[in-house]
Image (cartoon, helix red, strand yellow):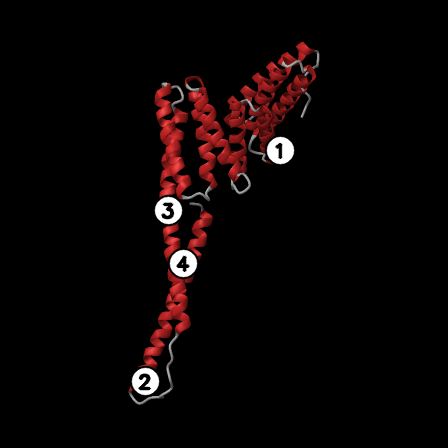
Amino acid sequence: MTIFDTAVSMEFFYIFIGVVVSLTGVVTAREEKMDQNAHGGDPEKTGTPWPFFAAAAVMSALVAVNSVYYLKAWAADNNFLYGLGNIKYYEANKTAAPQARLKILDLTLSHLDASMEQNPVESHYDVYYGLASNYYADVMKDLNPDAAKYQLNEGIKRLLACKDVTWEPEDLYMTLAGAYTRLGGLDNAIRYSKVVVDDWDHQNFYTRYNLADILMKRADKRSADGDAAGARDDLREAGGELKKGEAVIVGREDFAHVYGQMLELEKKIEKRLEKTGAGTAPAP
């Protein structure tokens, strides 16, 4: 449940309260008028405030419908929080035995499935379902490659279905890139990674590291296929992405480990470029 849902519901609730208060005032005035007539006052016909009764009936129905929706949303959020907790636990215990990690991820996917069924319009659940699918594939790739591939495709299907309506596109595209990388779809992985670094450069410097790593994988594939020129282009581009990422975090102690990883990968790229006689990576 997001703050946007809460704000709309609160506004709706206060409108409902306003109608009830207005209706109460009208009924009270009508009763006073009837009492005045009964004691010899103005015999003017009091009438029935039917518009207010009709408005109250409509608003009551809408409140009932809204309440049902929010009960489902509450249940969906509970399932999501269970799934999110399992994801955090998995990330902190990646060295555990495969079967133990698999049990955690099975529970995670089950909870996230339930949350998406209960509240299918919340794309936040789909993003974490995709992330959990990536982790599931990491565990299953050696135990059952077909099951790993199937789950990756399930995650991709959920992510693509909500990519035009999500309110966290950078996370969605990074998760998509991770899924395609695991499937060997390097062109799609690079394409979605570039969306992230081009549109959210200020915060996704680490994605540039991942993008450089994917470009190196594609360079290996192109080299194996005899496309030496394409491999060199990928290596140069990978080096350029690393330099851009380094420029964002250079001197930042809180990201010193990431900076070190970038420098290490950049050295590998430069050595490979030197072997091809293509020189070093271009400056950003």
Within-10-Å neighbours for mark 1: few <14, some 14–19, many 20+: few
State the CA–CA distance, disc 4 to disc 3. 16 Å
State the CA–CA distance, disc 2 to disc 1. 75 Å
- Farthest-out residue, top: 275
- Residue under pointer 3: 72
Q: Which quadrant is the C terminus positioned in? A: top right
- Residue under pointer 1: 198
Q: Identify the element where label 3 is drawn.
A: helix
Within-10-Å neighbours for mark 4: few <14, some 14–19, many 20+: some
- Residue under pointer 4: 62
Q: Identify the element where label 1 is drawn.
A: helix
* Residue 62, image quadrant: bottom left
Within-10-Å neighbours for mark 2: few <14, some 14–19, many 20+: some
Q: Earlier in the sequence, mark 1 or mark 3?
A: 3
Q: Earlier in the sequence, mark 2 or mark 3?
A: 2
Residue 22 can be seen, yes or no: no
Is 264 or 250 nearer to us in this picture? Answer: 264
Q: Residue at x 68, y 11 (%)?
A: 276
